[in-house]
Image: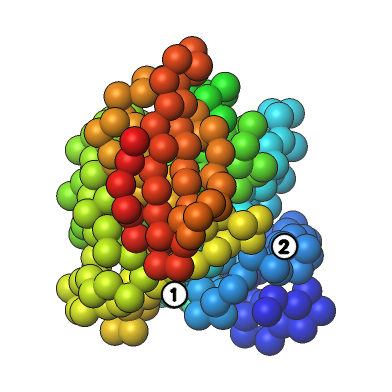
Amino acid sequence: MVDAGVCRGSERARLVRLCAAISGDREVAEDLAQETLLEAWRHRHKLTDARGADRWLAAIARNVCLRWSRTRSGLPVPVAELPEPTAPAEDDIAELLELLPPQSRDAMVQRYVHDRTHQEIAGSLGISSAAVSMRLTRGKQSLRQALAEAEWRPSGSTCPQCGTRKLLMRRTPTEIEFTCASCARGDVLVRYPLDNPQFARLVSGLHRPTAMFRRVGEWALHYFSGGAGADAVCTRCGQPVTVRAHVRQGGNRGLYVSCAGCGEEVWSSLAGISNGLPAVRELRPRRLLEVREERGLIAVVHGSLGGGRTVEAAFDRTTYALLGAA
């Protein structure tokens, strides 16, 4: 659990360095780090797996710093998008700095990851302190530009859950995310990790959300078809895994796998799995009408926006295995 009042010195120093690298202002980094910890404490119920705490906290820090940047520039400040916890990844600072040109990246890594002075950096790179300052300035400008390009943008596709609002899309070098201002309540609605080989093959070459949802829906329909207890393989490393049933906060039912080898976790709601059914895909545009329990099964009902057609997918109440659709 993340506690705003208890944070080891090394962890706090790392968080301050991350905030300094994102914001480009070392003087406010301490305040931004503290705000990050408070934000994490308020939403600590969302962290169900402590193994993903570092990446979860770093993602909150990015949102806090972006909010601060927008406030300074007079742009509207959106609600923070707090992600579900995932398996630990490489150091998030290094991941961010990979977006920069090599010369600026070297200087930024030494300054904000290894906390070296301008003089120490100049000595290691064989350049002057003035050149170090220039590279750091350019690096921070490039980083801010890269982050700005990764902000939420209208996708042009209607949300398949509420059917009333256009989805917002955010694409970075490592993931594609979607959210809906109406039904996602500030959370990320769908996330496709591009560093996962399976999802990279499915969506990396696509641009239209409907094409991504169709392809991933078809894959999820096959991958989770056996329900809880079925055998599968890890989408990242290929090791054997077991499908498990899971109910997220708010009662959202779904299936997930967690790999003991590489730590990768993949989850899909029952609504997301039923989106892969051909009959559901034909409902365009559509929305999720209801999820109800009856006679030992769970019914997920999709309907066309015009109200003329509905498709009801039936799942086993215990294993969440797909039983059929009508």
Crowding near pointer 1: few (<14 within 10 Å), some, many (20+)? some
Q: Residue furthest front?
A: 295
Crowding near pointer 2: few (<14 within 10 Å), some, many (20+)? few
The residue positioned 68% from the left and 52% from the top of the image is 64
Three-letter amino acid code at disc 2?
Answer: His
Q: Is residue 114 visible?
A: yes
Q: Which residue is mark 2?
A: 43
Q: Which residue is mark 1?
A: 88
Measuring from the top left, give residue 195's x and y in whole percent.
29, 59
Question: Which of labels 1 and 2 is toward the front?
Answer: 2
Measuring from the top left, give residue 225's x and y in whole percent.
27, 58
Judge from the rendering whether residue 47 lies leftward or rightward of residue 145; answer left or right. Answer: right
Three-letter amino acid code at disc 1?
Answer: Pro
Pick the residue in front: 176 or 123: 176
Q: Callout 2: helix, strand or loop?
A: loop
Mark 1 vs 2, N-terminal side:
2
Residue 98 is drawn in which quadrant?
Answer: bottom left
Q: How many labels, in total?
A: 2
The answer to the question of whether label 1 and label 2 lie on touching residues, with beta carbons closer than 8 A, is no
Q: Residue furthest right?
A: 5
Measuring from the top left, give residue 305's x and y in whole percent.
49, 18
Pick the residue in front: 122 or 207: 207
Measuring from the top left, give residue 320's x and y in whole percent.
41, 61
